[in-house]
Amino acid sequence: MEPVITRFPPSPTGYLHIGGARTALFNWLFARHHKGQFILRIEDTDQIRSTDESIKAILDAMDWLSLDWDQGPFYQTQRLDLYREYLQKLIENGSAYYCRCQPEELEKRRQQASAAGLKPKYDGLCRNLGLGPGPDRVVRFRTPDSGTTVLNDLIKGPIFFDNSELDDLVLQRSDGMPTYNFAVVVDDITMNVTHVIRGDDHVNNTPRQILIYQALGVKLPFFGHVPMILGQDRTRMSKRHGATSVMAYKEMGYLPEALVNYLVRLGWSHGDQEIFSRAELIEKFSLDNVGKAPGIFDPDKLLWLNAHYLREKAPEELTVLLKPYLKSFNYPEKPEKYLAKAVKTLQPRVHTLVELAQSMKFYLAESIEYDPAAAKKFLTPEVKEAFAKLTGAMGTLEVFDEAGLEQVFRRIVVDEMGMKLGKIAQPVRVALTGMTASPGLFEVIDVLGKDTVLQRMKLALAYIESR
Ligand code: GLU
């Protein structure tokens, strides 16, 4: 069997959309599964809308998702000679012709056709005029007037198109630029692409492309059209349903593993399994299990997956990933080891890196800020004595670790004062974190360390006295 070659050909007219990322991912996985090649091609023939920033944004997003390519990036604007060469073949064998009809005339004739109840397609005026090149002339494909074109879609099954319904599409615009449908065929032929996997918004383009392959006498690749991604209200995914740019998820503190895992399941399944490692995806991915129904974007599930991948990370690795997010909070610098220890206590409790960075505040900020309601409820004269005794006892502790601290608390609170540990744990939590919800109290104490703990206990005592 010939080696599998897939491709991802984004148009650089904006950022990488999550729909595009899923297409890229499916192509990448298909190539990796079959030990084939994955090509990146930039479809930049729309010179007005294509920008270098978009190219960079797309490459950055591919890089963030670790979707590496074996060939490319190729740029269509650097391949114009090749399109001209193929165009010449089509003109020579009679499959394409020059057309001098101008946009305004075409529009008028289309309107007339519509008014007469006819299909408003190109009326073929220049088809048999034998025109040559000239200013303001386009080149059109001579679409067969009859017959059926069959798309044997790997995902959707066979789809039939009446050729008579198809237009004589433009292959080359009057400025000499190839159109999408033509350039894509020349590229896929010359890059030996075996499998074209793309969004099903391209289904209607495919018969036109198939006819071009046939006119060139070239074997067809396999086509697989993946259903769209819809929002919860079943309309096409847009900003109303959540961020649509891949890199916006990075900014919001998502891990690429989570987004990849989420996107792959948005259209593909393997039994009930939800969580897949990259290696497992490569092993298991196949187009047979790509569904026919659209994927419905579910931000809660993505958040759930992100929390899962955050929990799975080694604290040291997570700390490295967290650094840029911490920066935006302007916390004072702390040693890497301290950060990792703090991260370890918080990582089971958060859903994003932004949330993690935010919740690091009580570990990192110079001064403690009390949640007013928490301070009012828990930092009361009732706990003053216990606070004073605990502060004294903790001050004499040689080894300031979780086990030792727990002993001190039990001895003072339970044995000496006859109180329940629970009664004092929450006030101490407020004293140390400013909040009523935090990781385990002894974990917190252990991370903060003796100096900070004693300082915050004394501060809480002062606060109680000032009430
Ligand atoms: N540039 C096209 C797009 O972004 C590529 C479609 C294709 O895969 O053929 O939709």
Image (tube, helix red, strand yellow):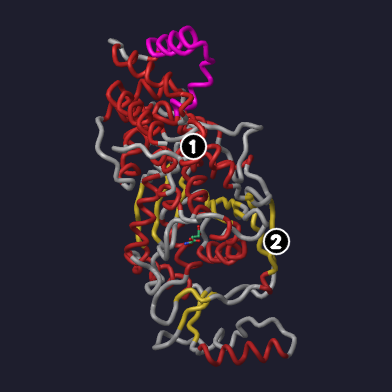
Would you say 202 lies left or right of 413 here?
A: right
User: What is the C-alpha distance between the residues marked 1 and 2?
Assistant: 73 Å
Would you say 111 lies left or right of 317 here?
A: right
- Helix, strand or loop status at disc 2: strand
Q: Is residue 3 visible?
A: no
Number of on-image labels: 2
Q: Nearer the viewer, residue 254 or 17?
A: 254
Q: Nearer the viewer, residue 57 or 190?
A: 57
Q: Residue at x 60, y 92 (%)?
A: 108
Give the label on residue 376, or none.
Answer: 1
Q: Residue at x 39, y 77 (%)?
A: 176
Q: Which residues are magenta?
A: 403-429
What's the amino acid at mark 2? Phe
Residue 76: x and y in percent read 37, 64
Give the label on residue 41, or none.
Answer: none
- Helix, strand or loop status at disc 1: helix
Q: From the Cβ of disc 1, is ligand 1 less than 8 Å away?
A: no
Let me know if residue 420 is in the magenta part: yes
Q: Residue at x 40, y 25 (%)?
A: 444
In this figure, which residue is indicated by the disc labeled 2? 160
What's the amino acid at mark 1? Lys
Residue 237: x and y in percent read 58, 58
